[in-house]
Amino acid sequence: MAGWVQADVINIHAGGAYNDKKSAIKRLKNNINRLPKGVRTLLTLENDDRVYTPKELLPVCQEINIPFVYDVHHHRCLPDGMDEEEVTEFAIDTWNREPLFHVSSPIEGWQGRNPRKHHDYVAISDFPKFWLNFDLTVEVEAKAKEKAVLKLKNELKLQQFSGRIPA
């Protein structure tokens, strides 16, 4: 199906831990290694907001040679002691083409009841300013879809022009 739509990435989350992350990760690696080469060349792993952190998945990606999609919102929901710049550098190193990263904002803000739920738009303060130093594809995960992408793009241009990108 990826071929039909000319997708260059098949992005997945690692899945469940089933009360034993070590065994679950071993099964994940074994199953990925069983995939046909054409599928493996498109496959990426992404950190999630409930089970698997960048710290847990980056070694998997490095070991089985598949790219890591860094979702900074998920990382903020499920921190692991690694800072965003460190994860960014490690994630970029897993790619042999332009990296794909994800960004979003919580609908109720970071102090809301459930910061996992995505907002219609991305707050410019949630976009890691140091990402501007890299050639990345940044996927905006927001309910307003293309409107959210255009709004963030325009805000980033204005901030870059004025030199004021919030931390």
Image (cartoon, helix red, strand yellow):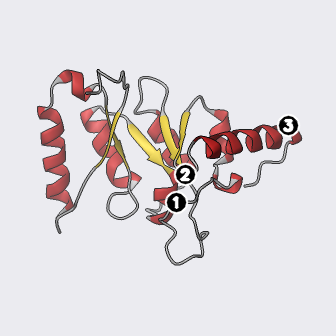
**What amino acid type should be assigned to the residue bearing mark 2?**
Ala
**What amino acid type should be assigned to the residue bearing mark 3?**
Phe
Image height of 124 relative to 99, above or below: below
**Residue 82 showing in the rendered view:** no
Residue position for label 3: 161
Residue found 38% across the figure and 52% down from its top = 47
Q: CA distance from mark 1 to mark 3?
A: 28 Å
Residue position for label 2: 142
Q: Secondary structure at mark 3?
A: helix
Image quarter hosting the C terminus: bottom right
Q: CA distance from mark 2 to mark 1?
A: 6 Å
Pointer 2 and pointer 1: residues touching (CB < 8 Å)? Answer: yes
Instruction: Give the number of the mark in front: 2 or 3.
Output: 2
Residue found 64% across the figure and 44% down from its top = 147
Res. 118 mark: 1
- Counting labels gives 3
**What amino acid type should be assigned to the residue bearing mark 1?**
His
Image height of 28 relative to 33, above or below: below
Q: Secondary structure at mark 2?
A: loop
Image height of 111 relative to 36, above or below: below
**Residue 111 showing in the rendered view:** yes
Image quarter hosting the N terminus: top left
